[in-house]
Image: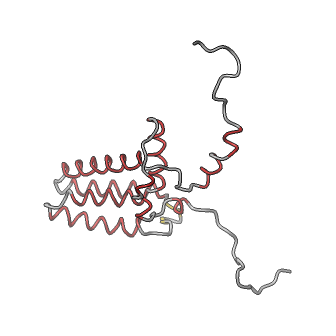
Amino acid sequence: MPSTTTTYGTITSAPTPISSRAKHTRRPWPEIFSLSSFSLPFSAGDAKARIMLNVSYFRVNYVIIALTILFLTLLWHPTSMIVFLITFVFWWFLYLFNDNPIVVFNKTVDDNVVLGALSFATVLLLVLTHVGVNVLVGLIIAVVVIGVHAAFRGTEELGFPDEEEENGLLSVVGSQPLRPTSGYNRI
């Protein structure tokens, strides 16, 4: 029969799997702007892979950057700024600083759904205040800034758990040879 007393250093509950929210947390700003981590991508495929990994890793930081750029495009439109600040309160509580998953009708809502719904609501409400061009320009600038940052920021030290297994010794042993093993090459 197991003991009912606990001692320091023991875990009394069963471990839970890592949620999708744990992968999409706000990262420290010095990590995102570390100058030593920037380098030129080797190819377009490398740039695409960097963009995919960086957008996944720095998702919340990139959302904050995009919202800041969008806010700056609204500086001379006070009604739109008020609408934006109201929607930003929802961003704040539902996505940016919410550590718990959102539950609606006893079902957990995925972070991507929350991100999409908040993005759609923000753009729709701002367009209804007659600043559609400003919103479009702001979103284009945000996509360019985030895309350039994600393409030039290296992904070597991001620390994805699956990435370390894929890039280890097994990837070298199980990979295809660089040179063909049979046949002749033209000179």
**Is 166 left, or right, of 21 in this rendering?**
right
* Camera-side residue of 60 and 176: 176
Q: Position of residue 183 (x, y in %)?
A: 68, 15
Numbered disc total? 0
The residue that appears at 36% across and 58% down in the rendered structure is 118
The residue that appears at 67% across and 39% down in the rendered structure is 172
Rendered position, 38 above or below 187: below
* Camera-side residue of 166 and 75: 166
Q: Position of residue 142 (x, y in %)?
A: 30, 51
What is the basis of the colouring in this image?
Answer: secondary structure
Rendered position, 61 above or below 150: below
Q: Which residue in the rendered view is the most extreme toward the right?
A: 1
For residue 65, which quarter of the picture?
Answer: bottom left
The residue that appears at 18% across and 57% down in the rendered structure is 129
Q: Position of residue 155 (x, y in %)?
A: 50, 50
**Quadrant (top left, top right, bottom left, bottom right) of the N terminus:** bottom right
**Quadrant (top left, top right, bottom left, bottom right) of the C terminus:** top right
